[in-house]
Amino acid sequence: MKRKTTYFIILCAVVMFLCNPGRISIAQTNTDKQLALQYFQNEEYDKAAVVYENLFNKSRLDYYYNYYLKCLIELEDFNKAEKVVKKQVKKNPENLSYLVDLGYVYKTNKEPAKSTQSFDKALKLLNSDRQQIVKLANAFLGREEDNYSINTYLKGRKLLRNSYSFHYEIAHVYYRSGQNNSMINEYLDLLSESPERKGQVQNILQSRLFEDVDEKALTHLHGELIKRVQKYPTAVVLGEMLVWYYVQREDFTGAFNQAKALDRRRNEEGNRLIKLGQLSIASKNYDVAIQCFEYVVSKGVDNRYYIRARRELLSAFNEKIISQDYTVEDLAKLEASYISAIDELGKSRMTMKLMRDLAHLQAFYLYKTASAVELLEEIIGMQGIQSKEKARCKLELADILVLKGLVWDASLYYSQIDKAFKHDPIGHEAKFRNARLFYYNGEFEWAQTQLDVLKASTSKLIANDAMELSLLITDNTIMDTTTEALLLFAKAELKDFQNKHDSALFILSSILDSFPRHTLTDDIYFMKAEIFAETRKYPEAIETLELVIGEYPLDILADDALFMMANIYQDKLGNEEKAMELYERMLKEYQGSLYVVESRKRFRSLRGDKLN
């Protein structure tokens, strides 16, 4: 009895399925849809048209209508296409997109008068429905009728009585049609209405004008900003846009003047000048950075940004002096400026960074290690200093101990920081420096163990440094069982860190003599070049870099050597023609290099292009 019941249920289910025409119809429709698309993709438009016509007549869906119309146009059956579209226009008078389709059919059939008439009619019938406005504009855009699309939005703006202005949409169409000046005007009009969209507009202009430089449009942007700032002096967003423009063009003097004008006009306290000064330092425009911070300092000690500006001003002076061929007198003046600032502001959490920077200057440039150590120990013992700030001072102190040759005392500090900040970048930095210390001492296996952990660091910079040192150890310990050459190379690196440049160069030369054609040879050449550059022996540096490029053009240091040589010619020797030649060589021969972007930027700048 149970088995008969089961058979009966199955039989009923089968009968119900077979008697359900809807299921069969859907299955057939899907099959026809796939068949039509296959015909269309194979450019068998006559076969596709038949199937799409049938599908459209059954469903009246725009999806099938659009494909059907495409087929008819491809077949140049314009009479039938016209009839199909007119039928849609009649049935759907509120959908103005069909009038655009009709105009497109006429235009494709070379009937421009009828095409214009149809397009104009669509525009004339437009009402104050925002959805209809956008739909019609997009329909024109889909048929590459950019001007009609713009006119649709402009009419929509009037119909909506400026309650929605379509600035974004119009600007996009202007950009698409190559009318960048008009695009710029729309975005600036948008900012006048909605200043809070400044960031969005800057991002758009950055990608559309600055990344692939459009000089004419940028000139227009500058002129338009100047004109509007003069016309609307109280519109802060326009002044801020002008500052942004100057920064993109790396005209930091222009940015400073405009930022200063904004600060004065709004009676501000200098915060925007602080930010601009920091940007200037990042771009190595130290003179403008100094101007920015001096302006804020000039506001007086009661200004809320006074201490910060004093700190940043010294940092700018520091960066400027260290980046140049400085003298002992330059360093002494800088030290005196630090001491004067600390005396004025007092020793506290607010001036701790000044104290740490002074310690670094004294230890690594003036060789006053005792004074530097005393200053850092004073910070570490101060009340109210956060543990991470103390860790930074301990890190600096450990480096100075390495400088003095007290490597195990330094290792103790590195280990303390690593243990206390195991999951923090400063802890990872301490672990790396400790691993490097063991590498200096020839304990490669222990160093490698620590470096393997650091390869997974969340800090990309530390992970890359760890990977680089790890590869150096691996490449020179697997094949070379004695590791004698690597031991000497590590010793030379330690001497270089300790500013014992002559000793480092002597050891490096001895490796070349004792181990000719060793796998370390290109590393030795490159390190010698770095020492020569650091000690201002630029001809020797260039000669050594040429050995890296000439003998090891396919090795990992070749692009580093080429970029370094170009920098020396540009920044140290003032030979811009030779620098251009080398940057161009980088672009041609090392297209996958990390230096390509900066090389292209410098090449264009030397050539005379105005860059973002």
Image (spheres, rainbow, N blue to C red):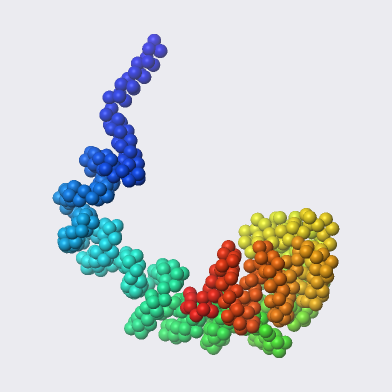
Q: x, y (%) of residue 503? A: 82, 75
Q: Is residue 525 visible?
A: yes
Front residue of 577 and 291: 577
Q: Is residue 342 left or right of residue 211?
A: right
Name, please, the residue furthest toward the top.
Answer: 1
Name above or below for residue 456 compared with residue 504. Answer: above
Q: Which residue is nearer to you in this view: 564 or 295?
A: 564
Measured as percent of width and height from the top left, residue 201 is found at 40, 69
- Residue at the location (34% across, 39% down)? 34
Name the image quarter holding residue 539: bottom right
Does 484 sit left or right of 337 as displayed? right
Residue 155 is situated, as x and y percent measured from the top left of the image, at: 22, 66
Is residue 171 visible in this depiction of the protein?
no
> Residue at (19%, 61%) from the top-left corner?
112
Foreground of the two, 592 or 422: 592
Position of residue 525 relative to residue 575, above or below, is above
Count of marks overlaid on the render: 0
| Residue at horizontal 32 percent and vertical 20 percent from the top | 12
Give left or right: position of 165 versus 390.
Answer: left
Q: Position of residue 240 (x, y in %)?
A: 43, 77
Residue closest to the eye, 90 or 589: 589
Using the rendered view, name the quadrant where residue 28 is placed: top left
Q: Is residue 245 left or right of residue 156?
A: right
Rendered-image quadrant of the N terminus:
top left
Which residue is painted at 65% across and 58% down in the image? Answer: 457
Give the quadrant of residue 450. Answer: bottom right
